Amino acid sequence: MRKHWLDNLRWGTVLLVLFYHVIYFFNNKGVFGGIGGFSDGPQYQDAVMYILYPWFMPLLFLLAGISARYALEKHPAREWFKARTRKLLVPGTIGLFVFHWMVGYFNTAVAARSGELDGMPGVGKFIMWAISGTGPLWFIQVLWLLSLVLLLVRAMDRKEKFYAWCDRAFSGKAGIVWIILLGVLFWAASLTLIQNPRPESADGLLNLYKPLFYLVPFLLGYFVFPHETVQEKLGSAWVPLLICAVIAGGILVSTTFGQDNTHPKYLSSPLNCIYGWLMCLAMTAMFKARFDRTGAFAAYMTRSSYGLYIVHYLVVASLGYMMKTYTQLPPLAIYAILTVAVFTLSPLLYEIIRRIPFIRWCVLGERR
């Protein structure tokens, strides 16, 4: 039986990613990427980044781990990984040169206007645009790598003794307490980040992708959260979990606003990790308890949310850059226009691409 709450939570989180990128693109907090803010003073709308960033990507990896478990119960590992390669690795590599080079064009537009690219041959510029167009595709690149790691982990536990142990360990009366205490692993994973990275170096790239950090929620999603008893315990505790998460988030935002919320020192702080883990649990619990149903819109979003994630940043980068660079629109109008655009033009762009056979395979990893 399909778990509609899982689908709904996934596409709901993707919609939050779309909105996050609207705010992120104009942030002035020193966060890598984007085009910069509208002033040097406080931009209180940037609080959205502090609210969402600690948990929404770890949650997507946790959900990916749950989905991997369910898929591998129905399909052979070889077949599953072949499908993962087409769905993740193809768009994350070939798709860069077919579609996402356009994102890279706008990502490097500031450098081009300053003359930094003068003299570079056309082929060199195109390759640079393609690589710079990775943007949100880091998620599917890391997810493909973690899927490969998962096959190695499964090979070491062929009889699934650890999976069975997790069911026993988290199904007892104190199960919800142990689930919450898994946040210690979440915090420990954050300590793998390099504290003083140089953005242009290998350590900066490692921090951008954070594979060791995201491996923890992914494996927890595979071994712990697929168990029905774990899901039921979470669902019954969704209200207190959400209240605790909101309190932790309020303290985090009020005490750290103005800092670079993507810096390793910030991400590895205990308060950030407490809030991030509690929100992962609270969202999982709330959707399990309240949103285990579907309808026409939910069914469409279940099918298309991956495609929206893949294509949406072109809308953000192109329209956001053009409005900020070539218009005198007030910031509120720019935010409003870009928000409407990303939620309307992204589905249109996705629907166009999925109807073009070869482009569909390159950009979305879909054969039909």
Image (spheres, rainbow, N blue to C red):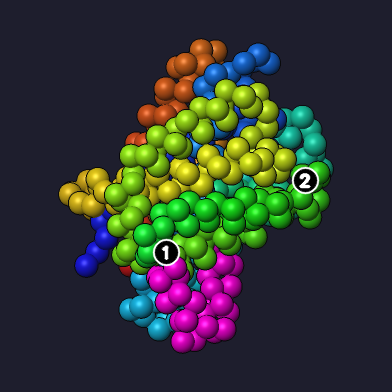
At a point 44% along the width and 36% down the height, the residue shown is: 244
Badge 2 element: loop
Nearer the observer, 130 or 43: 43
307 in magenta: no
At a point 40% along the width and 42% down the height, the residue shown is: 241
Q: Magenta residues: mostly which secondary structure?
A: helix
Circle 1: residue type: Phe
Residue 275 in picture, x, y percent from top left: 53, 39
Q: Quadrant of residue 326?
A: top right
The residue that mark 2 highlights is: 195
Residue 300 in picture, x, y percent from top left: 25, 51
Residue lying at the far bottom in this picture: please name it: 159
> Which stretch appears magenta?
143-170
Q: Classify 99 as above or below 113.
A: below
Q: Is residue 37 left or right of residue 220?
A: right
CA–CA distance between discs 2 and 1? 33 Å
Mark on residue 170? 1
